[in-house]
Image: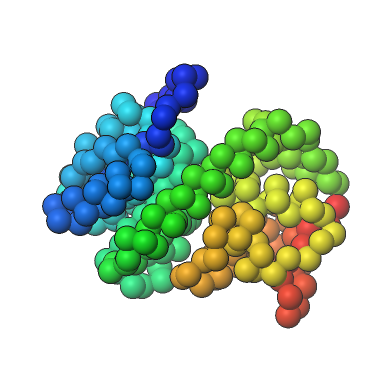
Amino acid sequence: MISQPPPTERSAKTVLVVEDEPTLASTLSYNLRKNGFNVVSEADGVAGLNAARRDVPDMIVLDLMLPKMDGLEVCRRIRAESDVPILILTAKSEEMDKVVGLEIGADDYLTKPFSMRELIARVKALLRRSAARAEESGVAKIVAGQLELDARGRVVLRGGAEVLLKPKEFDLLFFLAKNAGQVFTRDQILEQVWGYDFFGGNRTVDVHMRWLREKLEDTPGRPKQLLTVRGVGYKFVR
């Protein structure tokens, strides 16, 4: 299991880089350190998973194509144990690779080749969102119809039964429920929930909304709480 970081403060955030291309791994490590991060680097999936459990990083940059254990499996195992932000790297351009990565719990993705400036921006944005999420842990529960959201424990109950949500699904639901009745565009949701303007497109919002409806609505195709406002975006109705 990935334990929580010790209560003592660290002077800099630690980023775990799991990348098997030596040149890219070295470049990533150099640029992250240059921007004030501590870096732990591993070159295969098994070593990366072990490092995540051993070093308890604040953020993980994870390549999908890795020896010994592929990045999707590493991501899946880490996400089962921790809410640590995960940024996946892929050399493939197919939409399915990105969607699968998001589905198993990754917070963001970058398709190679990418600029180091963009990567650093993504890392910082995800860390900001992680910090904001931690601050929200003290917010009171939200009750809306059959739904009960507990931000402290990151638990969702529907009719008294717990519904298991992935970290980003919970973040999206909590944001919309906290602002019930207000309509948000996809870009506004990306900025507030993902923490940046999503360069890869806003389809990820639609994907996550679909997943939430499948888990929380009696009839996902005719939702009563997670509504689409045609031509604008989405809103939550209590």
To which quarter of the image does residue 101 belong? bottom left
Question: Relative to 3, is 84 above or below?
Answer: below
Where is residue 37? Give x, y as percent.
35, 41
The quarter of the image holding the N terminus is top left
Where is residue 80? Give x, y as percent.
45, 37
Q: Which of 96 and 122 is in front in this view?
A: 122
- The answer to whether residue 161 is seen in the rendering is no
Where is residue 112? Give x, y as percent.
29, 67
Residue at 45% across, 63% down: 99
**Colouring convention used in this rendered image of the protein:** rainbow
Residue at 68% across, 58% down: 213
Question: Relative to 199, is 217 above or below?
Answer: above
To which quarter of the image does residue 81 belong? top left
Residue at 44% across, 56% down: 122
Where is residue 15? Give x, y as percent.
35, 41
In the image, taking residue 204 as reference, residue 49 lies left or right, namely left
Residue at 54% across, 42% down: 130
- The answer to whether residue 72 is seen in the rendering is yes
Number of numbered discs present? Answer: 0
Question: Relative to 58, is 21 above or below?
Answer: below
In the image, taking residue 109 as reference, residue 125 lies left or right, namely right
To which quarter of the image does residue 138 belong? top right
In this view, the residue farthest toward the bottom is 231
In the image, taking residue 230 as reference, residue 16 lies left or right, namely left
In the image, taking residue 125 as reference, residue 210 lies left or right, namely right
Q: Nearer the viewer, residue 74 or 57?
A: 57
